[in-house]
Image (cartoon, rainbow, N blue to C red):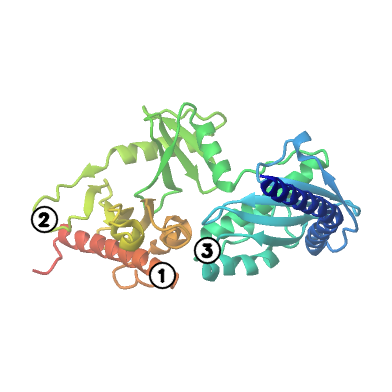
């Protein structure tokens, strides 16, 4: 028994000594670790703002800044540095961004990300240089990187948040909404009572209005003119947007009437491919064709998703009887983010405007394996539209 008590006492003594030594070690090393961390943090601050001098941490809880801003520093030279966290193709992209006293980007450094190394990761490394010198009014004009659209779009939006945060900290007001958010807000303002909108092509070769945005809740339509005037028309065809000129109101109402006069074409037993889901004909004789493109969202990735997703790319093509594309529009899709998702950008589908069966394949694509699935499915859908018009116009060879 006494031997057991003695052993216990020795063990307790050893633990006490170890605890003491750990406490002493921690007391000695903690300041060193903290100093090293501060040194690294200060190094990142100086990297994006070399002329900053010293930096003072700002309590971001005391001011309303964009949600992406997690830390803010005031530089001795009057500028600011921000740490921002956002999501690109994946979550966890962390940027450190410097903004000069006159509101220009002095540097950007990505200190953490989970993007695909060869695509989004590679784009991040080269994208920083394009941000230097940008201001709140010019940063939206920096092009995203093809093939890494989601990554660079999130990157650009975070940089814009940093520019906006700097304005706010200097006592000003900043609109840090993305161009898409501003556009959607303009649609809703033009048509009060509307919720979400679906973009549709206008079947008129000489139209001053290229697209119409239909409210999902049936409230009406919004037309966006070539001068970017937003004109709301209710379900009865009456212009409801305030401050619209008589000429613009007449144009909008005529487009509403044009859209209402589209006649459905019966394609039963016509030999038209089953992936063409709808054909309408306008009073001018043009065709409005809705077709499914079978891309990545349709075939999926059996290794990753276990089974195909069976979600097509929904495409609207407006074509003349002679076989010329007036307008091409991606209505919806579920293509892979950062790869085939670019098919939803006007920079992609707009390339088909004016194309014929002879040159529709002459479009820019991204040469990644995943994107080729999207692109091939899209081109096949366009090919089916040309074939459909040939059948409907009686030119198809038997």
Q: Residues within 10 Å of mark 3 (few under 14, many from 20)?
A: many
Q: Secondary structure at mark 2?
A: loop
**Quick one: quadrant of the C terminus?**
bottom left
Left of 30 or right of it: where is 278? left
Left of 71 or right of it: where is 388? left
Distance of mark 2 from mark 3, alpha carbons? Answer: 41 Å
Q: Which mark is residue 270?
A: 2
Q: Horizontal and vertical percent for residue 87?
A: 57, 52
Q: Is residue 166 above or below residue 125?
A: above
- Picture quarter containing residue 323? bottom left
Q: Which residue is mark 1?
A: 363
Q: Secondary structure at mark 3?
A: loop
Q: Horizontal and vertical percent for residue 378?
A: 33, 62
N-terminal label among 1 and 2: 2
Q: Which mark is residue 148?
A: 3
Q: Are marks 3 and 1 in contact (CB under 8 Å)?
A: no
Distance of mark 3 from mark 1, alpha carbons? Answer: 18 Å
Q: Would residue 136 be visible to someone looking at this image? A: no
N-terminal label among 3 and 1: 3
Left of 304 or right of it: where is 170? right
Of 66 and 134, the residue lying toward us: 66
Left of 118 or right of it: where is 164? right
The residue that appears at 52% across and 68% down in the rendered structure is: 119
Q: Residues within 10 Å of mark 1 (few under 14, many from 20)?
A: some
């Amino acid at each position: 028994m006494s031997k057991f008590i003695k052993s216990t006492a020795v063990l307790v003594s050893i633990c006490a000594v170890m605890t003491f030594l750990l406490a002493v070690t921690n007391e000695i090393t903690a300041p060193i670790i903290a100093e090293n961390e501060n040194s690294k943090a200060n190094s990142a601050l100086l990297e994006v703002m070399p002329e900053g001098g010293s930096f003072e941490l700002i309590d971001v809880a005391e001011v309303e800044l964009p949600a992406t801003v997690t830390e803010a520093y005031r530089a001795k030279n009057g500028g600011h540095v921000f740490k921002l966290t956002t999501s690109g193709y994946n979550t966890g992209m962390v940027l450190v961004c410097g903004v000069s006293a006159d509101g220009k980007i002095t540097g950007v450094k990505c200190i953490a990300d989970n993007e695909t190394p060869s695509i989004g990761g590679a784009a991040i490394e080269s994208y920083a240089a394009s941000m230097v010198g940008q201001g709140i009014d010019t940063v939206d004009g920096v092009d995203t990187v093809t093939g890494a659209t989601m990554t660079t779009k999130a990157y650009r939006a975070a940089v814009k948040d940093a520019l906006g945060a700097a304005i706010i900290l200097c006592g000003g007001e900043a609109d840090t909404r993305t161009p898409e958010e501003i556009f959607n807000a303009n649609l809703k303002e033009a048509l009060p009572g509307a919720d979400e909108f679906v973009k549709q092509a206008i079947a008129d070769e000489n139209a001053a209005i290229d697209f119409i945005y239909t409210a999902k809740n049936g409230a009406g339509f919004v037309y966006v003119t070539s001068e970017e005037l937003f004109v709301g028309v209710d379900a009865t065809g009456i212009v409801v947007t305030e401050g619209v000129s008589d000429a613009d109101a007449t144009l909008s109402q005529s487009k509403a009437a044009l859209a209402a006069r589209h006649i459905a074409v019966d394609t039963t037993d016509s030999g038209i491919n089953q992936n063409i889901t709808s054909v309408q004909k306008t009073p001018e004789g043009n065709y409005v064709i809705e077709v499914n493109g079978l891309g990545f969202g349709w075939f999926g990735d059996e290794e990753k998703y276990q089974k195909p997703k069976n979600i097509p790319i929904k495409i609207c093509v407006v074509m003349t009887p002679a076989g010329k594309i007036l307008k091409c529009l991606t209505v919806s899709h579920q293509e892979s983010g950062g790869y085939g998702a670019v098919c939803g950008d006007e920079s992609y589908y707009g390339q088909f405007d004016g194309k014929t069966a002879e040159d529709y394949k002459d479009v820019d694509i991204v040469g990644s394996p995943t994107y080729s699935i999207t692109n091939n499915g899209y081109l096949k859908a366009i090919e089916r539209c040309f074939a459909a018009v040939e059948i409907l116009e009686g030119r198809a060879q038997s």
